[in-house]
Image: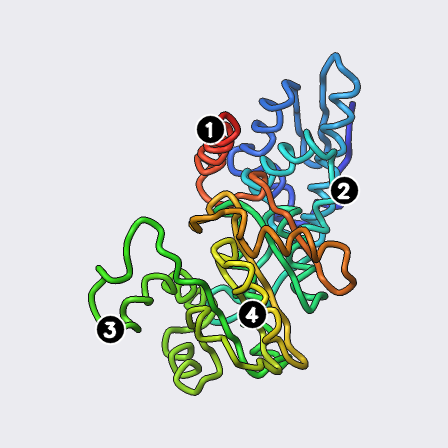
Amino acid sequence: MKINLTGLNEQGKLSALFGTNDENLKYIEKVYNVNISAINENITITDDDKETEKQVINLIKDLSNSITKGYKINKKVIKYLIDNSKENGLQNSEKLFSSFIRVGHQKGFVQPKTFGQEKYLQALKESDFTVCVGPAGTGKTYLAVARAVESLLEHEVTRLIVTRPAVEAGEKLGFLPGDIAQKIDPYLKPIFDALYEHLSFNKAAAMMEKGIIEVAPLAFMRGRTLNDSFIILDEGQNTTIEQMKMLLTRVGYSSKLVVTGDITQIDLINKKQSGLVVISKILRGIDGIEIINLSRNDVVRHPIVQKIIDAFTKYEQKK
């Protein structure tokens, strides 16, 4: 079965599809166990199974269309699209690559790396209240902070507030050195890491000094009304029902709220009292509230992280 990719005639576009030393085509060959030969823009796929040939052609056409429109393709992207297609069928990769967040000094923009992240990103842009539940490494906090920084820089909001509960996970606050600010700093460090990805250290520090950006423990939110703000509650699985209700009722006019968390990593003594678990159930279906569930397929860290998540899932199921 043959395919002609005349749309990739421009210099560099065919090599973007083929990869260095044809590594992309070789990877597709290996996964689908087919033979692929390419002469300029003409590609021939050979296999006894016509359905497999059709799948490979559809994949290559989809990749070709995305490259024609300027989107970057590499072996990692191809692997994800193939893995995803086995569970959900081949999806339009252009949808994945055309979504982005314009942010700060280092990267210029952030793109989702999975279809789950793409759905999450759309919710962050369109909804006033987004709940994102998923395992470690799925970009829950990273994308939320990126979108918050974009909103701040585009003057959609006047403040960015990021908070998380200071729940002890294996170590006691009292044993940590320093005053209360120094004791809670380790709990907030992941937030600062995400901020510095999108803003220079000096700019972020200046905004925090002026109160434009606030990073604080959840307890500091009590009694406040948060207007014209982009609010992120990170590690939401470690809030009690009362704490979650307290934060949700702080949200004022022209504000957005994002709650993120991983319900497999609850550090509360009574896990059934997790505020994230409760709102994921009782707020579902309410107009204006988006609840996004990410999975192991959306993990964008080292590939071994997916296997670790699977191992722990099996262990918990056995328990």
Is residue 205 visible to the viewer in this orientation of the structure? yes
Q: Nearer the viewer, residue 276 or 139?
A: 276
Label whose residue precedes the other's in the sequence (4 or 1):
4
Seen in the picture, residue 172 relative to 66 is either above or below; the reply is below
Residue 139 visible at all? no
- Name the residue at the bottom extreme: 210
Say what secondary structure mark 3 lies in: loop
The type of colouring in the image is rainbow
Question: Which corner quadrant of the image does residue 29 belong to?
Answer: top right
Distance (Cα) linking label 2 and label 4: 55 Å
- Identify residue for label 3: 179
Q: Select label 2 or label 4 by which is in front.
A: 4
Disc 1 marks which residue?
Answer: 315
Q: Amino acid at mark 3?
A: Asp
Give, as a three-letter code, the residue at label 1. Answer: Tyr
Q: Which residue is mark 4?
A: 247
Q: Earlier in the sequence, mark 1 or mark 2?
A: 2
Residue 99 at x, y = what percent? 67, 58
Q: Residues within 10 Å of mark 4 (few under 14, many from 20)?
A: many
Q: Residue 127 occupies which quadrant of the picture?
A: bottom right
Task: Provide the residue designation for mark 2.
Answer: 6
Q: Is residue 285 above or below residue 104?
A: above
| Element on which disc 2 rests | helix
- Residue 92 in the image: x percent, y percent? 74, 44
Q: Is residue 183 above or below residue 32?
A: below
**What is the C-alpha distance between the residues marked 1 and 2?**
51 Å
